[in-house]
Image (tube, rainbow, N blue to C red):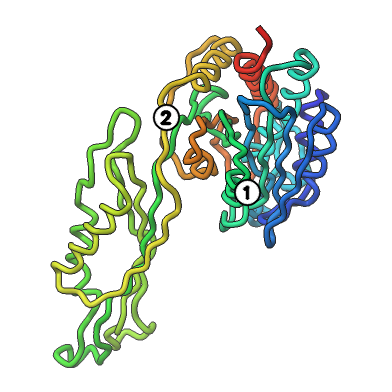
Amino acid sequence: MSEVIDILKDLISRRSVTPEDAGCQQMMADYLKESGFNIESMVFEDTTNMWARKGSEGPVFCFAGHTDVVPSGPTEQWHTPPFEPTEINGYLHGRGTADMKGSLAAMLVATKRFVAKYPNHKGSIAFLITSDEEGPFINGTTRVIDTLEARNEKITWALVGEPSSTHKVGDVIKNGRRGSLSGDLVVKGVQGHVAYPHLAKNPVHIAAPALAELSQIQWDKGNDYFPPTSFQISNVNAGTGATNVVPGEMHVQFNFRYSTEVTAEILVERVHSILDAHGLEYSLDWTYNGLPFLTDEGLLVEAAVKAIEDTTHTKPELLTTGGTSDGRFIAPTGAQVVELGPVNATIHKINECVKIEDIELLTDMYEKILINLLAND
């Protein structure tokens, strides 16, 4: 078996469910030290992070990723134990194979190969690895970036190893992500007996027209890189569980995935204006999950596109769809950011798996990106 698959199996066998790292970063650190990396462990609260760097000059190319995985779910529903890497018909099964330990293994081996070929390469290579990407994401990449910014240590290019591919590895590069804004709404009414509605005020009834309006609005039309902003209600709760009681409150949770055509402030203002126009008595708490970012063009996108074309002889598509990623914490520093990783068909699912050949191809892509950006002329 190849070195990259051996490393991937080692990572999968470590039960690193958020925010546990389970020794993954120490294994990665030991591997990187052999190629001349300086290792800095940054532990914030319950989260283990690693900043590894080889070189002291710019430009700085950074591999970014996470060692934590989501829970396996019911293990009896898996074909094989989720934390025992198992090969089946050319695929490697196990929790984290695609999201995103396959990328981590590819990053390590690609870097080792590149440094061996170009020991005096330009600039610096870095790794920013966290164990808190799948969880609350408050003590992970964002805290490392704060630390780096405080000492004016800048990342020029960042490649996040999220599983970006759709049908085959390298068919999609994520060159941006939509912003995410969540609302926690409580509409207030008056509890009472359903037989005496004139003595009660049903918050479900009075909130329904406002929620319907919010769900039908066209917030923007999107642009060349982003689809239109979407508003989705994710949770609704009201009532005591009894059929003869008018609820006194209604709780609604919703989320915006928004483009660069609007700002969080605009969305907040419009929501409040609609709720106010319907005469609702309410409270509304907002959670700002991340700003939208876009790496439109430049050396990083060009290097990634060329690497994929040279590896698979196909041209990747540039997209900004999907959820959030830790790229949202890196991009505001001025870094160019892209995401490139395995096929995402099985991420967070029972029987998560990757095609073994894809991890080999991804390793080649990562190495070519390093060559395109940092190889000596």
**Residue designated by label 2:** 319
Q: Position of residue 338 (x, y in %)?
A: 51, 30
Please, what is the three-letter code of the amino acid marked with disc 2? Leu
Q: Position of residue 356 (x, y in %)?
A: 70, 26
**Residue designated by label 1:** 147
Q: Nearer the viewer, residue 198 or 51?
A: 51
Q: Left or right of 306: which side holds 64?
A: right
- Dot 2 or dot 1: first in sequence order is 1
Q: Indicate which label's residue lies in the foreground, 2 or 1.
A: 1
Q: Left or right of 366: which side holds 204?
A: left
Residue at (72, 55) in percent of width and height: 43
Q: Quadrant of residue 344?
A: top right
Residue at (36, 55) in percent of width and height: 255
- The residue furthest front is 151
Kind of element beneath mark 2: strand
Q: Quadrant of residue 38?
A: top right
Q: How far apart are the two marked residues, 2 and 1, measured between alpha carbons?
A: 30 Å
Disc 2 crowd rating (10 Å Cα; few below 14, some 14-19, many 20+) is some
Quadrant of the frame with the N terminus: top right
Q: Position of residue 283 (x, y in %)?
A: 31, 74
Residue at (78, 17) in percent of width and height: 119
Q: Quadrant of residue 212?
A: bottom left
On residue 356, the disc is none
Work out whether residue 75 can be spotted.
Answer: no
Residue at (30, 47) in percent of width and height: 263
Q: Would you say the residues marked 2 and 1 are in contact, meaning their CB atoms lie under 8 Å apart?
A: no
